[in-house]
């Protein structure tokens, strides 16, 4: 065996060791902005947490700063975003931050937020990913739990579905199909071990259809949405181009799926395939995986 191959094997062993152990942030992370649905300005401070803490939201604006675990059992409503709750305390639109944390290997973190919804920022997870990367990771002396899907699991609603298939490594594949031609049918597949979340998934922004905006606002939704934090599409084209990727909408859906699956604590070893799905179906699959593995 050559010296070069010895070095490669050693590097691979180090990488495997790092992935095996839980991690927290090396430094705090702060962000502020407006919530997509509430329109409320909030501040967020994310700090390191001990092993086995998990990712915990804390409503610092409420008496006693109630803790809300980022776990499947805490899911409340899933209309156009994922909301978590504990008692009367809730926090909405958690999926973008959670996708960044789980994809960048942060298992344990305290997330203090001063309002009922996480800030949308630019509509993507890129600001979160950039801030988390700058803060750095701190390995911890506790093994990361592993969830291995050994039998197919699926949930569906008419022709929409999410399925988890046994696989040698984690992979997510997403498909969408919209009647508006500028979006149409799109697919994207991504494996977390490629280490490309920050460049391939995190920059993808949330999107909406122009003809639905007035109705959604009449229902008390998307009060904080704007052309600065969401892509808007009408039947003829994009209102606020350019796109960051040719298939940015489906990449954003895959981002949402990552955030919702993170509620298991760690991403399962499985090939997760979704088609025309929603936060509701994402969470239903996470619940099925949790039930199958007694989480």
Image (cartoon, grey):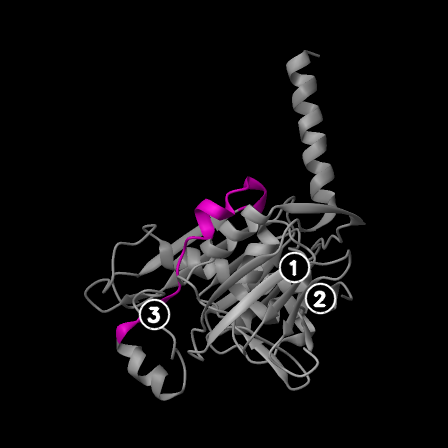
Question: Hey, which quadrant is residue 213 in on the image?
Answer: bottom left
Which residue is pictured at 58% across the width and 61% down the height?
98
Q: Earlier in the sequence, mark 3 or mark 2?
A: 3
Which residue is pictured at 43% across the width and 51% down the height?
188
Instruction: Quote the CA–CA distance across marks 1 and 3.
Output: 32 Å
Residue 243 screen position, x and y as percent: 30, 54
Please name which of the two marks, 3 or 2, marks the residue nearer to the observer: 3
Residue 209 screen position, x and y as percent: 30, 71
Q: Which residue is mark 2?
A: 290
Using the image, determine if residue 224 lies above or below residue 161.
below
Residue 122 lies left or right of residue 165; in this view the side is left
Q: Secondary structure at mark 3?
A: strand
Instruction: Quote the CA–CA distance across marks 3 and 2.
Output: 31 Å
Furthest residue toward top: 2
Residue 27 screen position, x and y as percent: 63, 51
Residue 208 disc label: 3
Q: Which residue is mark 1?
A: 47
């Amino acid at each position: 065996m050559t010296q070069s191959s010895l070095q490669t094997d050693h590097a691979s062993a180090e990488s495997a060791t790092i992935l095996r152990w839980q991690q927290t942030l090396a430094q705090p992370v702060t962000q502020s902005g407006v919530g997509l649905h509430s329109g409320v300005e909030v501040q967020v401070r994310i700090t390191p947490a001990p092993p086995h803490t998990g990712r915990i939201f804390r409503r610092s604006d409420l008496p006693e700063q109630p803790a809300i675990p980022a776990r499947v059992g805490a899911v409340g409503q899933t209309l156009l975003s994922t909301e978590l709750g504990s008692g009367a305390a809730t926090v909405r639109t958690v999926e973008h931050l959670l996708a960044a944390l789980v994809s960048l290997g942060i298992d344990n973190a305290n997330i203090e937020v001063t309002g009922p919804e996480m800030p949308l920022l630019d509509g993507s997870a890129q600001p979160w990913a950039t801030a988390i990367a700058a803060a750095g990771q701190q390995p911890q002396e506790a093994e990361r739990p592993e969830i291995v899907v050994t039998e197919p699991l699926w949930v569906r609603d008419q022709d929409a579905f999410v399925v988890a298939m046994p696989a040698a490594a984690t992979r997510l594949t997403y498909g969408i199909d919209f009647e508006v031609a500028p979006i149409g049918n799109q697919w994207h597949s991504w494996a977390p071990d490629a280490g490309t979340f920050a460049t391939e998934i995190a920059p993808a922004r949330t999107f909406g259809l122009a003809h639905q905006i007035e109705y959604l606002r009449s229902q008390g939704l998307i009060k904080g949405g704007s052309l600065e934090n969401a892509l808007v599409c009408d039947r003829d084209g994009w209102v606020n181009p350019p796109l960051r990727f040719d298939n940015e909408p489906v990449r954003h859906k895959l981002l949402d799926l990552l955030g919702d699956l993170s509620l298991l604590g760690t991403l399962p070893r499985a090939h997760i395939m979704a088609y025309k799905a929603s936060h509701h179906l994402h969470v239903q699959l996470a619940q099925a995986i949790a039930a199958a593995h007694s989480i």
